[in-house]
Amino acid sequence: MDVHKILQHEEPFLKFLGLKLLEVREGFAKLELEYKEELTRRGKVLHGGVIMSSIDYAGGIATITVNDGVDQVTQELKVNFLEPMYKGPFTVEANVVRRGRTAVVVEIKFTDSEGRLGAIALGTWYILREKRVTGNREA
């Protein structure tokens, strides 16, 4: 799968968040997220849903680099929020821990501009081998 093509043409939510791909290689993805007040909650700290979405994207992109199927979906994602995040830009790094035939396990870390760990996650992505995920049930 072509990571850059997918992100450029098929991921409007990634653009909405403002996530930027900094580095991608086999089994690894590194993204950056700028601090924007629109992405915060009360107290001007980054919203947990934004952190979780960023983690999901990073893990998914790392999975794409080892995916020999036709598509993938997030099967499970566990996030531990450790610190409030308000010093951007933020970095999200994902490392594939194990690649199997139908599932890929990824560890993801979310840090602030000072390197402080704000969240750590472990996720599983399910590899689809026969059809892509679409909003059209007939696809």
Image: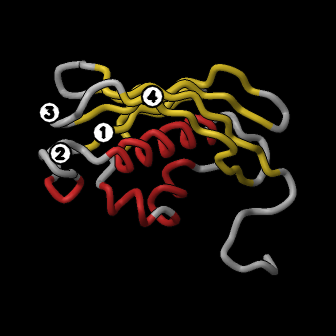
Return the x and y of residue 84 as percentages of the image width and height: 23, 32
Find numbered disc 1 in the image and state the secondary structure of the residue it sits on. strand
* Residue picked out by circle 4: 80
Q: Amino acid at mark 2?
A: Tyr
Q: Indicate which disc, 1 or 3, sits on the residue closer to the N terminus.
A: 1
Label 2 Cα neighbours within 10 Å, binned few <14 / some 14-19 / many ≥20: many
* Residue picked out by circle 3: 87
Label 4 Cα neighbours within 10 Å, binned few <14 / some 14-19 / many ≥20: few
Q: Amino acid at mark 1?
A: Glu
108 vs 50: above or below: above
Find numbered disc 3 in the image and state the secondary structure of the residue it sits on. loop
97 vs 21: above or below: above
Residue 35 occupies quadrant: top left
- In terms of depth relative to the viewer, which is nearer, 41 or 63? 41
Q: Indicate which disc, 1 or 4, sits on the residue closer to the N terminus.
A: 1
22 vs 73: above or below: above
Pointer 1 with pointer 3, Cβ within 8 A:
no
The residue furthest front is 42
What number is the disc on residue 35? 2
Between the C-alphas of marks 1 and 2, the distance is: 10 Å
